[in-house]
Image (tube, rainbow, N blue to C red):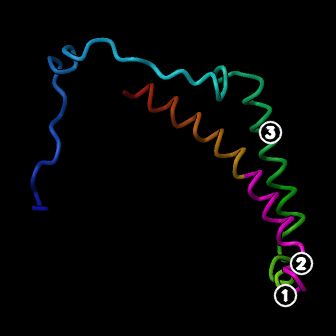
């Protein structure tokens, strides 16, 4: 790669017009809209689950790892993965809405 080389051209008004109407993502499989009760519920649940995870596991994971058979690390990982999946859904939706609004 050469420094200073232009890697992409900016879109001109004519080029954008030639594309016509672009399709829009259907995000209904995630949430029905930014004000959806399910989205608000999941955000609240993610916040409370994160606090509960911290309260339960903060400062204990090393000790659990030293216990026979890994102690309760499996329980911690299961809780963490559930929280990560929920937050991932929320962040995916927000990111796709943002990308759709800036395209």
First-in-chain label (1 vs 2): 1
Residue shown at the point (80%, 32%) measured from the top left: 41
Give the residue at mark 3. 44
State the extent of the magenta-drawn residues as a range: 67-83
- Relative placement, left or right, of 4 versus 38 is left
First-in-chain label (3 vs 1): 3
First-in-chain label (2 vs 3): 3
Question: Do residues under tags 2 and 3 come within 8 Å of each other at their CB atoms?
Answer: no
Camera-side residue of 47 and 90: 90
**Disc 3/disc 1 C-alpha distance (Å):** 34 Å
Residue shown at the point (69%, 21%) measured from the top left: 35
Q: Which picture quadrant has residue 76?
A: bottom right
Give the residue at mark 1. 66
Q: Which picture quadrant has residue 73?
A: bottom right
Q: Is residue 32 above or below residue 79?
A: above
Question: Do residues under tags 3 and 1 come within 8 Å of each other at their CB atoms?
Answer: no
Q: Secondary structure at mark 3?
A: helix
Q: Is 1 inside the magenta-drawn segment?
A: no
Q: Residues within 10 Å of mark 1 (few under 14, many from 20)?
A: few
Give the residue at mark 2. 71
Residue shown at the point (13%, 62%) measured from the top left: 1
**Disc 2/disc 3 C-alpha distance (Å):** 30 Å
**Residue 80 x %, y %:** 76, 59
């Amino acid at each position: 790669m050469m420094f200073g080389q232009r890697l992409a051209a900016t879109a001109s008004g004519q080029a954008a017009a030639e594309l016509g109407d672009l399709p829009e993502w259907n995000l209904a499989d995630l949430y029905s809209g930014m004000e959806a009760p399910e989205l608000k519920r999941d955000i609240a649940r993610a916040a409370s689950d994160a606090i509960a995870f911290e309260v339960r596991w903060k400062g204990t994971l090393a000790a659990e790892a030293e216990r026979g058979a890994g102690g309760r690390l499996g329980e911690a990982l299961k809780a963490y993965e559930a929280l990560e999946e929920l937050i991932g859904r929320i962040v995916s939706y927000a990111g796709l809405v943002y990308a759709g609004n800036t395209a």
